[in-house]
Image (cartoon, rainbow, N blue to C red):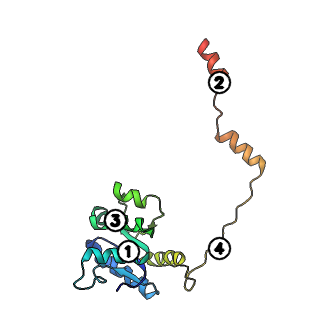
Amino acid sequence: METNRDVFISHSSADSQLAYAMCHYLEEKGMRCWIAPRNVQGGREYAEAIIMGIRNCKIMVVLFNENANKSNYVKNEVERAFSYQSILIPFKVDQTIPSATLELFLGSVHSLDATNGNPEDCFDLLYQNCARVLGKKEGVIEEKPVHAVPISEKTIIDNNAIDHVAPPSLNENNNNNNN
């Protein structure tokens, strides 16, 4: 029987080593993760196990790169998570642009950028984001609010005058056409 988990890790089989490292990191921090093939019970249909894993997780982390972009399994998992209204967190490890299929589901959510250097260095950022989504306070670094600096009316007027060119009036266009 499936138990509720926090995070489903969607990844291409070509990236299993990195996905398992991510899973281990999150679990060491107290997250309950679901990852294939580890959590597929023997004798169970693979697709059914994946669907149940997705349904029982609040968040899907997509280990996103060229391999994931080409993987039909990743595409199907992301579509199902979207359908079940799971929180999608793309964890980008290269500069691959999502295919049209993945763009539909991932294009409107903020990705975590792990493209510079070693992706493992960004696991804590991933943990912090997952913990906030789950409402966990322990071990989460609280962000301080950014206070807006008031802008004077003169600055707004000056910026409008500099940055915006007024379109010609309708009368000016008509006068120019009549000449």
**For the residues carrying marks 2 and 3, which lies nearer the camera in this image?**
2
| Alpha carbon distance from label 1 to label 2 | 58 Å
Q: Earlier in the sequence, mark 4 or mark 2?
A: 4
Q: Amino acid at mark 2?
A: Leu
| Alpha carbon distance from label 4 to label 1 | 33 Å
Query: Can you say whether 156 is above or below 82 in the image?
Result: above
Residue 98's disc is none
Which residue sits furthest top?
A: 179
Query: Can you say whether 80 is above or below 171 in the image?
Result: below
| Quarter assignment of residue 105 | bottom left
Q: In this view of the protein, can residue 56 be seen by the observer? A: yes
Q: Badge 1 is on which residue?
A: 54
* Residue depicted at x 64% and y 16%: 175
Q: Quadrant of the N terminus?
A: bottom left
Q: Amino acid at mark 3?
A: Asn
Judged from the image, the secondary structure of the residue bearing numbered disc 2 is helix
- Residue neighbourhood size for the residue with mark 3, other residues' Cα within 10 Å, grouped as few (<14), some (14–19), many (≥20): many
The image position of residue 156, as x and y in percent, is 73, 47
Residue 170's disc is 2
Q: Badge 3 is on which residue?
A: 65
